[in-house]
Image: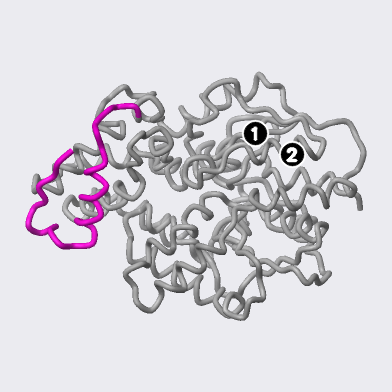
Protein backbone atom coordinates (compact mmCIF):
# COMPACT_ATOMS: atom_id res chain seq x y z
CA UNK A 1 0.00 0.00 0.00
CA UNK A 2 1.73 3.18 -1.19
CA UNK A 3 1.09 6.49 0.55
CA UNK A 4 1.67 10.05 -0.58
CA UNK A 5 1.90 12.01 2.65
CA UNK A 6 0.46 15.51 2.65
CA UNK A 7 3.09 18.25 3.18
CA UNK A 8 2.09 18.84 6.80
CA UNK A 9 2.96 15.23 7.70
CA UNK A 10 6.19 14.80 5.75
CA UNK A 11 9.20 14.55 8.00
CA UNK A 12 7.13 14.58 11.21
CA UNK A 13 7.46 11.75 13.78
CA UNK A 14 3.78 10.82 13.45
CA UNK A 15 3.82 11.03 9.67
CA UNK A 16 7.00 8.98 9.25
CA UNK A 17 5.85 6.29 11.69
CA UNK A 18 2.36 6.06 10.20
CA UNK A 19 3.80 5.87 6.68
CA UNK A 20 6.15 3.04 7.67
CA UNK A 21 3.26 1.09 9.23
CA UNK A 22 0.95 1.68 6.27
CA UNK A 23 3.52 0.39 3.81
CA UNK A 24 3.42 -3.03 5.49
CA UNK A 25 -0.29 -3.47 4.80
CA UNK A 26 -1.02 -5.68 1.76
CA UNK A 27 -4.80 -5.21 2.05
CA UNK A 28 -5.41 -8.97 2.38
CA UNK A 29 -8.36 -8.61 4.76
CA UNK A 30 -7.39 -11.42 7.15
CA UNK A 31 -7.82 -8.92 9.98
CA UNK A 32 -11.56 -8.52 9.37
CA UNK A 33 -12.14 -12.14 10.42
CA UNK A 34 -10.94 -11.43 13.96
CA UNK A 35 -12.14 -7.84 14.45
CA UNK A 36 -14.92 -7.68 17.09
CA UNK A 37 -16.61 -4.58 15.69
CA UNK A 38 -16.59 -5.94 12.14
CA UNK A 39 -18.09 -9.17 13.51
CA UNK A 40 -20.92 -7.17 15.09
CA UNK A 41 -21.54 -4.50 12.46
CA UNK A 42 -20.40 -6.05 9.19
CA UNK A 43 -19.18 -2.65 7.93
CA UNK A 44 -15.79 -2.58 6.22
CA UNK A 45 -15.12 0.83 7.78
CA UNK A 46 -15.60 -0.74 11.22
CA UNK A 47 -12.79 -3.21 10.60
CA UNK A 48 -9.01 -2.66 10.55
CA UNK A 49 -8.71 -2.61 6.75
CA UNK A 50 -11.39 0.06 6.38
CA UNK A 51 -9.98 2.16 9.19
CA UNK A 52 -6.52 1.91 7.65
CA UNK A 53 -7.95 3.35 4.42
CA UNK A 54 -9.60 6.18 6.36
CA UNK A 55 -6.33 7.04 8.10
CA UNK A 56 -4.40 6.77 4.84
CA UNK A 57 -6.77 9.29 3.25
CA UNK A 58 -6.26 11.74 6.14
CA UNK A 59 -2.47 11.41 5.92
CA UNK A 60 -2.68 12.08 2.20
CA UNK A 61 -4.49 15.36 2.80
CA UNK A 62 -8.20 14.47 2.76
CA UNK A 63 -10.22 16.35 5.35
CA UNK A 64 -11.60 14.00 8.05
CA UNK A 65 -15.24 14.18 9.09
CA UNK A 66 -17.33 13.16 12.09
CA UNK A 67 -17.93 9.88 10.27
CA UNK A 68 -14.18 9.28 10.11
CA UNK A 69 -13.96 10.02 13.82
CA UNK A 70 -16.85 7.68 14.63
CA UNK A 71 -15.31 4.70 12.82
CA UNK A 72 -12.01 5.24 14.65
CA UNK A 73 -13.84 5.66 17.97
CA UNK A 74 -15.54 2.30 17.50
CA UNK A 75 -12.19 0.52 17.39
CA UNK A 76 -11.55 -1.29 20.71
CA UNK A 77 -7.76 -1.20 20.17
CA UNK A 78 -7.85 -4.89 21.11
CA UNK A 79 -5.04 -5.59 18.61
CA UNK A 80 -6.54 -8.93 17.62
CA UNK A 81 -5.82 -7.83 14.07
CA UNK A 82 -2.10 -7.66 14.88
CA UNK A 83 -2.14 -11.32 15.91
CA UNK A 84 -3.88 -12.22 12.64
CA UNK A 85 -1.90 -9.97 10.28
CA UNK A 86 0.62 -11.89 8.13
CA UNK A 87 2.54 -8.68 7.36
CA UNK A 88 3.15 -7.55 10.94
CA UNK A 89 1.17 -4.30 10.64
CA UNK A 90 1.34 -2.46 13.99
CA UNK A 91 -2.25 -1.35 13.85
CA UNK A 92 -2.41 -0.29 17.52
CA UNK A 93 0.27 2.35 17.00
CA UNK A 94 -1.32 3.49 13.76
CA UNK A 95 -4.81 3.99 15.20
CA UNK A 96 -3.44 6.06 18.10
CA UNK A 97 -1.76 8.37 15.57
CA UNK A 98 -4.88 8.47 13.42
CA UNK A 99 -7.20 9.30 16.29
CA UNK A 100 -4.94 12.05 17.51
CA UNK A 101 -4.76 13.69 14.07
CA UNK A 102 -8.52 13.38 13.47
CA UNK A 103 -9.36 14.75 16.92
CA UNK A 104 -7.20 17.80 16.21
CA UNK A 105 -9.20 18.48 13.04
CA UNK A 106 -12.74 17.43 13.94
CA UNK A 107 -14.37 19.07 16.94
CA UNK A 108 -16.46 16.77 19.08
CA UNK A 109 -19.91 17.76 20.38
CA UNK A 110 -19.84 19.41 23.80
CA UNK A 111 -21.37 16.39 25.57
CA UNK A 112 -18.69 14.08 24.17
CA UNK A 113 -15.91 16.45 25.15
CA UNK A 114 -17.30 16.70 28.69
CA UNK A 115 -17.58 12.92 29.12
CA UNK A 116 -14.11 12.24 27.76
CA UNK A 117 -12.67 14.99 29.95
CA UNK A 118 -14.41 13.56 33.01
CA UNK A 119 -13.01 10.09 32.31
CA UNK A 120 -9.52 11.39 31.63
CA UNK A 121 -9.30 13.50 34.76
CA UNK A 122 -11.70 11.66 37.07
CA UNK A 123 -10.32 8.13 36.76
CA UNK A 124 -6.77 9.33 37.43
CA UNK A 125 -7.67 11.74 40.25
CA UNK A 126 -7.07 11.23 44.02
CA UNK A 127 -10.78 12.05 44.34
CA UNK A 128 -11.73 8.84 42.51
CA UNK A 129 -11.52 6.70 45.67
CA UNK A 130 -13.85 8.85 47.83
CA UNK A 131 -16.22 9.30 44.88
CA UNK A 132 -16.36 5.51 44.46
CA UNK A 133 -17.07 5.03 48.17
CA UNK A 134 -20.00 7.42 47.85
CA UNK A 135 -21.22 5.52 44.81
CA UNK A 136 -20.98 2.23 46.70
CA UNK A 137 -23.01 3.66 49.58
CA UNK A 138 -25.70 4.82 47.14
CA UNK A 139 -25.42 1.84 44.79
CA UNK A 140 -28.97 0.48 45.37
CA UNK A 141 -30.35 3.88 44.34
CA UNK A 142 -28.30 4.25 41.17
CA UNK A 143 -29.62 3.54 37.66
CA UNK A 144 -28.70 0.09 36.34
CA UNK A 145 -26.18 1.55 33.89
CA UNK A 146 -24.25 3.18 36.75
CA UNK A 147 -24.59 0.17 39.05
CA UNK A 148 -22.72 -1.82 36.40
CA UNK A 149 -19.72 0.48 36.86
CA UNK A 150 -19.73 0.47 40.68
CA UNK A 151 -18.50 -2.76 42.30
CA UNK A 152 -19.72 -3.87 45.71
CA UNK A 153 -17.67 -2.69 48.66
CA UNK A 154 -14.49 -4.71 49.10
CA UNK A 155 -13.99 -7.06 52.05
CA UNK A 156 -11.78 -5.69 54.84
CA UNK A 157 -9.33 -8.54 54.20
CA UNK A 158 -8.60 -7.04 50.79
CA UNK A 159 -6.29 -4.55 52.47
CA UNK A 160 -4.12 -7.16 54.27
CA UNK A 161 -0.56 -6.74 53.01
CA UNK A 162 2.31 -9.10 53.91
CA UNK A 163 4.97 -7.67 56.24
CA UNK A 164 7.86 -10.10 55.72
CA UNK A 165 11.00 -8.92 53.94
CA UNK A 166 12.72 -11.00 51.26
CA UNK A 167 16.00 -10.61 49.36
CA UNK A 168 14.05 -10.88 46.11
CA UNK A 169 12.02 -7.75 45.45
CA UNK A 170 9.74 -6.47 42.69
CA UNK A 171 7.94 -3.20 42.09
CA UNK A 172 4.18 -3.38 41.55
CA UNK A 173 2.16 -0.74 39.73
CA UNK A 174 -0.92 -0.31 41.91
CA UNK A 175 -2.77 1.42 39.07
CA UNK A 176 -5.23 4.30 39.00
CA UNK A 177 -8.67 2.74 39.65
CA UNK A 178 -7.69 -0.73 40.87
CA UNK A 179 -6.77 0.21 44.48
CA UNK A 180 -10.23 1.70 44.97
CA UNK A 181 -12.40 -0.56 42.78
CA UNK A 182 -10.91 -4.00 43.39
CA UNK A 183 -8.17 -3.62 46.04
CA UNK A 184 -7.92 -7.35 46.68
CA UNK A 185 -6.12 -7.85 43.36
CA UNK A 186 -3.07 -5.91 44.55
CA UNK A 187 -2.98 -7.37 48.06
CA UNK A 188 -3.55 -10.91 46.72
CA UNK A 189 -0.63 -10.36 44.35
CA UNK A 190 1.59 -9.32 47.26
CA UNK A 191 0.48 -12.31 49.38
CA UNK A 192 1.06 -14.84 46.58
CA UNK A 193 4.49 -13.40 45.81
CA UNK A 194 5.29 -13.37 49.53
CA UNK A 195 4.43 -17.07 49.74
CA UNK A 196 6.96 -17.65 46.95
CA UNK A 197 9.67 -15.63 48.71
CA UNK A 198 9.32 -12.37 46.79
CA UNK A 199 8.68 -9.00 48.42
CA UNK A 200 6.33 -6.56 46.67
CA UNK A 201 7.12 -2.84 46.76
CA UNK A 202 4.85 -0.01 45.63
CA UNK A 203 6.59 3.25 44.74
CA UNK A 204 5.12 6.47 46.08
CA UNK A 205 4.15 8.76 43.24
CA UNK A 206 3.44 6.09 40.64
CA UNK A 207 -0.08 6.19 39.24
CA UNK A 208 -1.93 5.69 35.98
CA UNK A 209 0.25 3.96 33.40
CA UNK A 210 -0.74 6.56 30.80
CA UNK A 211 -3.17 4.39 28.83
CA UNK A 212 -6.31 6.32 29.76
CA UNK A 213 -5.04 9.65 28.47
CA UNK A 214 -3.27 8.07 25.51
CA UNK A 215 -6.40 6.26 24.32
CA UNK A 216 -8.45 9.45 24.74
CA UNK A 217 -6.09 11.27 22.33
CA UNK A 218 -4.30 13.19 25.09
CA UNK A 219 -0.85 12.21 23.88
CA UNK A 220 1.09 14.71 25.95
CA UNK A 221 -0.89 13.86 29.08
CA UNK A 222 -0.16 10.17 28.55
CA UNK A 223 3.56 10.87 28.17
CA UNK A 224 3.49 12.94 31.37
CA UNK A 225 1.99 9.97 33.24
CA UNK A 226 4.76 7.76 31.87
CA UNK A 227 7.50 10.17 32.93
CA UNK A 228 6.01 10.44 36.43
CA UNK A 229 6.04 6.66 36.83
CA UNK A 230 9.59 6.38 35.56
CA UNK A 231 10.67 9.03 38.08
CA UNK A 232 8.93 7.09 40.88
CA UNK A 233 10.53 3.77 39.93
CA UNK A 234 13.96 4.94 38.88
CA UNK A 235 15.71 5.09 42.29
CA UNK A 236 14.97 1.39 42.92
CA UNK A 237 15.75 0.46 39.30
CA UNK A 238 19.02 2.42 39.19
CA UNK A 239 20.15 0.91 42.50
CA UNK A 240 19.41 -2.61 41.25
CA UNK A 241 17.07 -3.24 44.19
CA UNK A 242 14.31 -4.89 42.14
CA UNK A 243 14.40 -7.70 39.62
CA UNK A 244 11.21 -6.71 37.80
CA UNK A 245 8.39 -4.17 37.55
CA UNK A 246 5.25 -6.27 37.79
CA UNK A 247 1.87 -5.55 36.21
CA UNK A 248 -1.20 -7.44 37.42
CA UNK A 249 -3.42 -5.52 34.98
CA UNK A 250 -2.56 -6.64 31.47
CA UNK A 251 -3.75 -3.30 30.05
CA UNK A 252 -1.12 -1.50 32.07
CA UNK A 253 1.40 -4.18 31.14
CA UNK A 254 1.13 -3.61 27.40
CA UNK A 255 1.41 0.16 27.90
CA UNK A 256 4.45 0.07 30.20
CA UNK A 257 6.20 -2.44 27.97
CA UNK A 258 5.91 0.21 25.24
CA UNK A 259 7.33 3.10 27.30
CA UNK A 260 10.58 2.69 25.39
CA UNK A 261 8.77 3.27 22.11
CA UNK A 262 6.54 6.06 23.42
CA UNK A 263 9.45 8.07 24.85
CA UNK A 264 12.09 7.14 22.27
CA UNK A 265 12.33 10.75 21.08
CA UNK A 266 12.65 12.24 24.58
CA UNK A 267 16.39 12.67 25.24
CA UNK A 268 15.86 12.99 29.00
CA UNK A 269 13.78 9.80 29.30
CA UNK A 270 14.54 7.56 26.30
CA UNK A 271 17.17 5.40 28.03
CA UNK A 272 15.24 5.19 31.30
CA UNK A 273 12.02 4.32 29.47
CA UNK A 274 13.77 1.58 27.52
CA UNK A 275 15.18 0.12 30.76
CA UNK A 276 11.77 0.25 32.47
CA UNK A 277 10.18 -1.55 29.52
CA UNK A 278 12.88 -4.22 29.63
CA UNK A 279 12.20 -4.85 33.33
CA UNK A 280 8.41 -4.93 33.01
CA UNK A 281 6.70 -8.30 33.41
CA UNK A 282 3.07 -9.25 33.37
CA UNK A 283 2.34 -11.16 36.58
CA UNK A 284 1.64 -14.28 34.51
CA UNK A 285 5.24 -14.26 33.29
CA UNK A 286 6.34 -15.01 36.86
CA UNK A 287 4.19 -18.16 37.04
CA UNK A 288 6.89 -20.62 35.82
CA UNK A 289 8.99 -19.55 38.82
CA UNK A 290 6.06 -19.37 41.25
CA UNK A 291 4.33 -22.69 40.59
CA UNK A 292 7.02 -25.01 42.07
CA UNK A 293 7.23 -22.83 45.20
CA UNK A 294 3.46 -22.58 45.69
CA UNK A 295 2.42 -26.20 45.10
CA UNK A 296 3.21 -27.39 48.62
CA UNK A 297 1.57 -24.33 50.19
CA UNK A 298 -1.87 -24.74 48.67
CA UNK A 299 -4.65 -26.34 50.72
CA UNK A 300 -5.68 -29.79 49.57
CA UNK A 301 -9.23 -29.63 48.30
CA UNK A 302 -11.49 -30.50 45.41
CA UNK A 303 -10.28 -29.04 42.12
CA UNK A 304 -11.91 -25.66 41.54
CA UNK A 305 -13.53 -25.36 38.12
CA UNK A 306 -12.56 -22.12 36.41
CA UNK A 307 -13.27 -20.51 33.03
CA UNK A 308 -10.43 -18.27 31.84
CA UNK A 309 -11.01 -15.17 29.74
CA UNK A 310 -7.64 -14.04 28.36
CA UNK A 311 -7.73 -10.25 27.96
CA UNK A 312 -6.84 -8.81 24.57
CA UNK A 313 -4.02 -6.84 26.17
CA UNK A 314 -2.51 -10.13 27.36
CA UNK A 315 -2.94 -12.36 24.31
CA UNK A 316 -2.72 -9.77 21.54
CA UNK A 317 -1.04 -6.72 23.05
CA UNK A 318 1.66 -8.64 24.96
CA UNK A 319 1.43 -11.79 22.82
CA UNK A 320 1.26 -13.98 25.96
CA UNK A 321 -0.89 -17.06 25.37
CA UNK A 322 -1.41 -20.33 27.18
CA UNK A 323 0.63 -19.56 30.28
CA UNK A 324 -2.09 -18.74 32.79
CA UNK A 325 -4.36 -21.71 32.17
CA UNK A 326 -1.45 -24.18 31.94
CA UNK A 327 0.08 -23.05 35.23
CA UNK A 328 -3.25 -22.86 37.06
CA UNK A 329 -3.92 -26.44 35.97
CA UNK A 330 -0.48 -27.39 37.28
CA UNK A 331 -1.47 -25.91 40.65
CA UNK A 332 -4.51 -28.15 40.84
CA UNK A 333 -7.25 -25.98 39.37
CA UNK A 334 -9.43 -27.14 36.49
CA UNK A 335 -9.21 -24.34 33.93
CA UNK A 336 -10.97 -24.16 30.59
CA UNK A 337 -11.04 -21.74 27.68
CA UNK A 338 -14.15 -21.32 25.59
CA UNK A 339 -14.39 -23.73 22.66
CA UNK A 340 -14.58 -20.78 20.27
CA UNK A 341 -14.04 -17.01 20.30
CA UNK A 342 -11.56 -17.03 23.20
CA UNK A 343 -9.53 -14.63 21.05
CA UNK A 344 -12.32 -12.02 20.85
CA UNK A 345 -12.61 -8.94 23.08
CA UNK A 346 -15.17 -8.84 25.91
CA UNK A 347 -15.99 -5.19 25.14
CA UNK A 348 -14.37 -3.55 28.18
CA UNK A 349 -11.32 -1.97 26.52
CA UNK A 350 -10.57 0.67 29.14
CA UNK A 351 -13.05 3.52 28.81
CA UNK A 352 -14.71 1.93 25.74
CA UNK A 353 -17.56 0.42 27.76
CA UNK A 354 -18.52 3.95 28.88
CA UNK A 355 -18.03 5.66 25.51
CA UNK A 356 -19.52 2.89 23.33
CA UNK A 357 -21.92 1.08 25.69
CA UNK A 358 -24.13 -0.51 23.02
CA UNK A 359 -21.23 -2.28 21.33
CA UNK A 360 -19.51 -3.02 24.65
CA UNK A 361 -22.53 -4.76 26.15
CA UNK A 362 -23.15 -6.73 22.96
CA UNK A 363 -19.58 -8.02 23.11
CA UNK A 364 -19.90 -8.73 26.85
CA UNK A 365 -23.04 -10.80 26.34
CA UNK A 366 -21.45 -12.63 23.40
CA UNK A 367 -18.44 -13.48 25.58
CA UNK A 368 -20.58 -14.62 28.53
CA UNK A 369 -22.65 -16.80 26.17
CA UNK A 370 -19.41 -18.68 25.47
CA UNK A 371 -18.18 -18.79 29.09
CA UNK A 372 -21.39 -19.71 30.92
CA UNK A 373 -21.89 -23.18 29.35
CA UNK A 374 -18.56 -24.24 30.89
CA UNK A 375 -20.44 -24.14 34.25
CA UNK A 376 -17.47 -22.62 36.11
CA UNK A 377 -17.39 -21.93 39.83
CA UNK A 378 -15.66 -18.68 38.87
CA UNK A 379 -14.56 -16.83 35.75
CA UNK A 380 -10.98 -15.60 35.97
CA UNK A 381 -9.17 -12.99 33.92
CA UNK A 382 -6.10 -10.79 34.11
CA UNK A 383 -7.31 -7.22 33.74
CA UNK A 384 -9.54 -5.15 36.02
CA UNK A 385 -11.59 -3.72 33.16
CA UNK A 386 -12.50 -7.18 31.83
CA UNK A 387 -13.29 -8.42 35.35
CA UNK A 388 -15.66 -5.59 36.21
CA UNK A 389 -17.28 -5.55 32.76
CA UNK A 390 -17.98 -9.29 32.73
CA UNK A 391 -19.20 -9.23 36.34
CA UNK A 392 -21.85 -6.68 35.37
CA UNK A 393 -23.54 -9.32 33.20
CA UNK A 394 -23.38 -12.52 35.27
CA UNK A 395 -23.99 -13.81 38.80
CA UNK A 396 -20.96 -16.11 38.44
CA UNK A 397 -18.04 -14.61 40.45
CA UNK A 398 -15.46 -12.96 38.19
CA UNK A 399 -11.97 -12.59 39.67
CA UNK A 400 -8.34 -12.07 38.86
CA UNK A 401 -6.59 -15.43 38.57
CA UNK A 402 -4.15 -14.43 41.33
CA UNK A 403 -7.09 -14.12 43.74
CA UNK A 404 -8.01 -17.80 43.40
CA UNK A 405 -4.41 -18.79 44.13
CA UNK A 406 -4.42 -16.49 47.16
CA UNK A 407 -7.67 -18.05 48.43
CA UNK A 408 -6.14 -21.53 48.09
CA UNK A 409 -3.00 -20.68 50.08
CA UNK A 410 -2.78 -22.40 53.47
CA UNK A 411 -2.90 -19.92 56.36
Residue 108 position in % (x across, y down): 23, 49
Nearest to the observer: residue 368 or residue 8: 8
Residue 157 position in % (x across, y down): 80, 56
Q: Earlier in the sequence, mark 1 or mark 2?
A: 1
Residue 92 position in % (x across, y down): 36, 46
Q: Is residue 16 magenta?
A: yes
Q: Is residue 278 visible?
A: yes
Specify start and end residues of the magenta stretch as a single range. 1-30
**Eyeballing the image, is 203 above or below 396?**
below
* Residue of label 2: 328
Identify the element where label 2 is drawn: helix
Nearest to the observer: residue 346 or residue 83: 83
Neighbour tally class for label 2: few under 14, some 14-19, many 20 plus, Cα within 10 Å: many
* Residue of label 1: 308
In three-dimensional space, the C-alpha distance between marks 1 and 2, rounded to whole angstroms, equals 10 Å
Nearest to the observer: residue 95 or residue 358: 95
Q: Residue visible at 64% across and 50% down? A: 285
> Is there a contact, CB below 8 Å, between mark 1 and mark 2?
yes
Q: Report the magenta stretch's main SS.
A: loop
Picture quadrant where residue 79 is located? top left
Q: Is residue 288 left or right of residue 263?
A: right
**Eyeballing the image, is 334 above or below 275?**
above
Q: Is residue 137 visible?
A: no
Q: Is residue 5 left or right of residue 44?
A: left
Q: Residue visible at 18% across and 62% down? A: 12
Residue 43 position in % (x across, y down): 27, 25
Q: Residue visible at 63% across and 46% down? A: 151
Identify the element where label 1 is drawn: strand
Amino acid sequence: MQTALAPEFRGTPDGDEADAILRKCVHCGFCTATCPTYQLLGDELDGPRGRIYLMKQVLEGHEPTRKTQLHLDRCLTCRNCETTCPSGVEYGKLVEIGRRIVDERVERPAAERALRGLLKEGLTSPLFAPALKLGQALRPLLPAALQNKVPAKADVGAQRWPTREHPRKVLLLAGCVQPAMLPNINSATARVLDAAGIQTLVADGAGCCGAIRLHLSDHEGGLADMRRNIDAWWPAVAAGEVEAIVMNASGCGVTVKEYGHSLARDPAYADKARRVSELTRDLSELLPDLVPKLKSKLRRRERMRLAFHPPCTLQHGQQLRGGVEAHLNALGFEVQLTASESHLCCGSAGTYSVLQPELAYALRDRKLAQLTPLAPQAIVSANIGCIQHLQSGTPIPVKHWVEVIDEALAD
